[in-house]
Image (cartoon, rainbow, N blue to C red):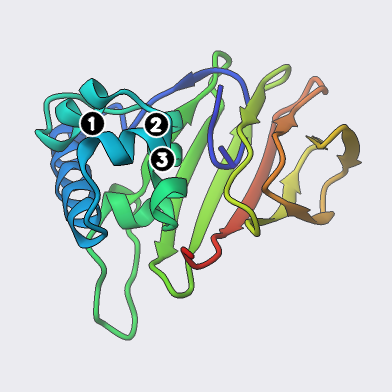
Amino acid sequence: MSGEQRSGMSGTDTAAESGDDRAVMEAVAARVRALRKERGWSLDALAARARVSKGVLVSLENARSNPNLATLVRLCDAFGVPLTTLLQQPAAPLLQPAPPADQAVLWSGPGGGRGLLVTGAAPPVGAELWHWKLAPGEEHRSEAHVSGTVELLHVLRGTLTVTAGGQEVVLPQGYGLRMAGDHPHSYANRTEAETEYAGVVLVPPHG
């Protein structure tokens, strides 16, 4: 769902704007370094695959900058992993609760809307669970994700307009949607009341 986000509307992409920024930065830095080394990629190779500058990667891997959501999504697509893989270490317990304090707000809209990454699963499953709120007039736009990505949506409140690949659908409260995530897409609230929806992003295994 992915201004650009993995689950998508225009606005300011931010990576957890709170007192936990340092923890998020350090977690992302550690995971990006580890994933890059596992694959034997240089900084230049990752920069080319993720379509970000080498300077951005250097700052990110040294936890000197807090990357925006678009950058995180491009890195995830390059690695073939869900966003939660960059934000937290995989856990072994059979049951792993995700308390509100551990859920990151990764998109904020100009009218107060937000995109909350609730939890996720690392490959080979590769999934992200999102909770979205869009204020009237807000829109979230997303780049195309890697081929084979699938998004599942459920409108909890209000009306959601989804656009992908030149097609558009209006979803009232209670409606669900299955959508190919490998085309540019957007999510919009074109009504005068708040829209709330849940989304699951299914990320294919990295080839």
Can you say whether 91 is above or below 155 in the image? below
Mark 3 Cα shell of 10 Å, populated few (<14), some (14-19), many (≥20): some
Whether residue 166 sits left or right of residue 3 in the image: it is right
What residue is shown with label 1?
A: 57
Quadrant in the rendering for residue 184: top right
Give the image quarter of residue 73. Answer: top left
Residue at figure coordinates x 61%, y 20% from the top left = 10
First reached walking from the N terminus: tag 3 or tag 2: 3
Residue 15: image location, x then y, percent:
34, 31
* Disc number for residue 71: 2
Could you say which quadrant of the image residue 113 lies in? top right
Residue 114: image location, x then y, percent: 52, 31
Q: Amino acid at mark 1?
A: Leu
What amino acid type is highlighted by mark number 3?
Arg
State the mark number for residue 188: none
> Quick check: 129 above or below 23?
below
Image quarter where the N terminus lies is top right
| Amino acid type of the residue that numbered disc 2 sits on in the rendered structure | Thr
Query: Label 1 crowding class (10 Å Cα cut-off): few <14, some 14-19, many 20+?
Result: many
Mark 3 sits on what residue? 49
Relative side of 189 to 15, left or right: right
Cα distance in 3D space between marks 1 and 2: 10 Å
Q: Position of residue 32 (x, y in %)?
A: 23, 47
Q: CA distance from mark 1 to mark 3?
A: 12 Å
Between marks 3 and 2 in the image, the one whose residue lies nearer the viewer: 3
Residue density around tag 2, few if under 14, some if 14–19, many if 20 or more, within 10 Å? many
Assign a secondary structure to mark 3: helix
Q: Nearer the viewer, mark 1 or mark 3?
A: 3
